[in-house]
Image: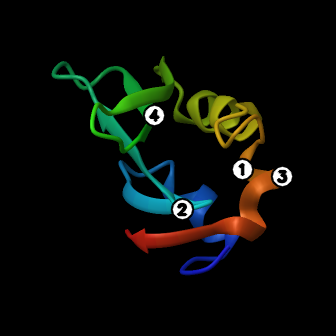
């Protein structure tokens, strides 16, 4: 991973991130946010296309549960963040 270490990237997922990344020439936004009541955390990954495509969403009261689900999700052409990390560049965030 370029632009962040993998550990930095994963750690940031707990704190309402807004990260723009590139993988195999495709841009993605990874963002985290809290609902209006301040009770639920959502972590989401969206592929930036003409029509954005949400590839991953997980909502829970437990931020760790959201991050763990992200770590296991085959978001990057069927690969997890760990399998794809050598080809990921953090562009923003």
Residue 74 is situated, as x and y percent measured from the top left of the image, at 73, 33
Q: Which mark is residue 83?
A: 3
**Along the line of sight, the residue nearer the viewer: 15 or 72:** 72
CA gap between label 2 and label 3 equals 16 Å
State left or right for residue 33 relative to residue 36: right
Secondary structure, mark 2, is loop
CA gap between label 3 and label 4 equals 19 Å
Q: Name the residue under label 1.
A: 81
Q: In this rendering, which labeled residue sits more in front, label 3 or label 4?
A: 3
**Along the line of sight, the residue nearer the viewer: 5 or 53:** 53
Total tally of numbered discs in the picture: 4
Circles 2 and 3, Cβ within 8 Å, touching? The answer is no
Q: Residue 71 carries which label?
A: none
Q: Which residue is drawn at 56% across and 71% down?
A: 89
Q: Name the residue under label 2.
A: 25
Residue 90 is situated, as x and y percent measured from the top left of the image, at 50, 70
Position of residue 22 relative to residue 31, above or below, is below
CA gap between label 4 and label 1 equals 14 Å
Picture quarter with the N terminus: bottom right
Q: Could you classify mark 3 by the number of other residues whose Cα lies within 10 Å: few (under 14), some (14-19), or many (20 or more)?
A: few
Q: Residue at x 52, y 34 (%)?
A: 63
Q: Mark 4 points at which residue?
A: 43
Secondary structure, mark 4, is strand
Q: Residue at x 39, y 60 (%)?
A: 20
Circles 3 and 1, Cβ within 8 Å, touching? The answer is yes
Position of residue 35 relative to residue 87, above or below, is above
Q: In this rendering, which labeled residue sits more in front, label 1 or label 2?
A: 2
């Amino acid at each position: 991973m370029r632009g962040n270490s993998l550990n930095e990237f994963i750690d940031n997922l707990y704190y309402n991130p807004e990260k723009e990344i590139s993988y195999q020439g495709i841009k993605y936004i990874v963002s985290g946010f809290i609902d209006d009541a301040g009770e639920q955390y959502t972590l989401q990954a969206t592929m930036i296309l003409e029509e954005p495509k949400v590839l991953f969403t997980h909502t829970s009261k437990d931020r760790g549960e959201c991050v763990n689900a992200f770590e296991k999700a085959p978001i990057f052409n069927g690969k997890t963040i760990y399998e794809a990390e050598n080809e990921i560049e953090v562009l923003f965030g």
